[in-house]
Image: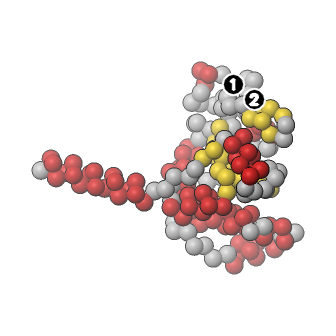
Amino acid sequence: MKKISLGLIAIFAFSISAIAQDINWLTMEEALELQKKEPKKIFMDVYTNWCGPCKMLDKNTFQTKDVAAYINEHYYAVKFNAEGNEEITYKEKTYTNPNYDESKANRRNSAHEFSRLLQIRAYPTMVFFDEEGNVIAPIQGYLKPQQLELYLKIFKTDKYKDMTTQEEFSEYVKTFEAEFEE
């Protein structure tokens, strides 16, 4: 009986991992370097170690096959800890976290200079960059796959450039037909 139970657990675990797909996460420097060879937009997940909604975004949204496949195909994906100790060079300037406290690595810590440059005010935030590494827009909060799909596609296709009013964006949202599974 135990062997059957363990076998079923193993099969279930394998089938779940087969469904999930991983995003090919890079550092910001790697993404910017790759842009020089093959221009693509950058999708950045700005998170912190203590942020519950950030963990939910990782588990419930980034692990879905539609989201991971779309990001991997159309973007360079960057994961950035907004309160971490990583050194980032962006637009020929180096950003650090001079007030980082190692003893607070898994709880609230000092904000990184790069997150301040990006004007990150909440976690999680997803920042979209154009093919030249310029910020397009930050999108705050936890998003389900179909909610994220809207932003992934509006920035990938440059449709955001045609929208000059809130009404135009609202109309786009209203008529948007999601294809990703929830």
Q: Residue lying furthest right in this view?
A: 164
Q: Is residue 56 left or right of residue 125?
A: left
Asked which quadrant contains residue 175, the reply is bottom right
* Residue annotated with mark 2: 96
Depth order, front residue of 165/89: 89
81 in relation to 11, above or below: above
| Residue 21 % position (x, y) | 49, 56
| Residue 32 % position (x, y) | 74, 46
Residue at the image point whose x is 56% and y is 58% from the top: 68
Badge 1 amino acid: Tyr
56 in relation to 167, above or below: above
Q: Residue lying furthest left in this view?
A: 1
Residue at the image point whose x is 51% and y is 68% from the top: 181
Q: CA distance from mark 2 to mark 1?
A: 9 Å
* Residue annotated with mark 1: 100
| Residue 65 % position (x, y) | 50, 61
| Residue 67 % position (x, y) | 57, 61
Local SS, label 2 = loop
User: Taking the image as drawn, is residue 44 in sight?
Assistant: yes
22 in relation to 80, above or below: below
Asked which quadrant contains residue 118, the reply is top right
Residue at the image point whose x is 66% and y is 46% from the top: 78
Q: How many marks?
A: 2
- Which mark's residue is nearer the viewer, 2 or 1? 2
Local SS, label 1 = loop
- Residue 22: assigned label: none
Asked which quadrant contains residue 79, the reply is top right
User: Taking the image as drawn, is residue 28 in sight?
Assistant: no
Q: Are marks 2 and 1 in contact (CB under 8 Å)?
A: yes
Q: Is residue 90 left or right of residue 15?
A: right
Badge 2 amino acid: Thr
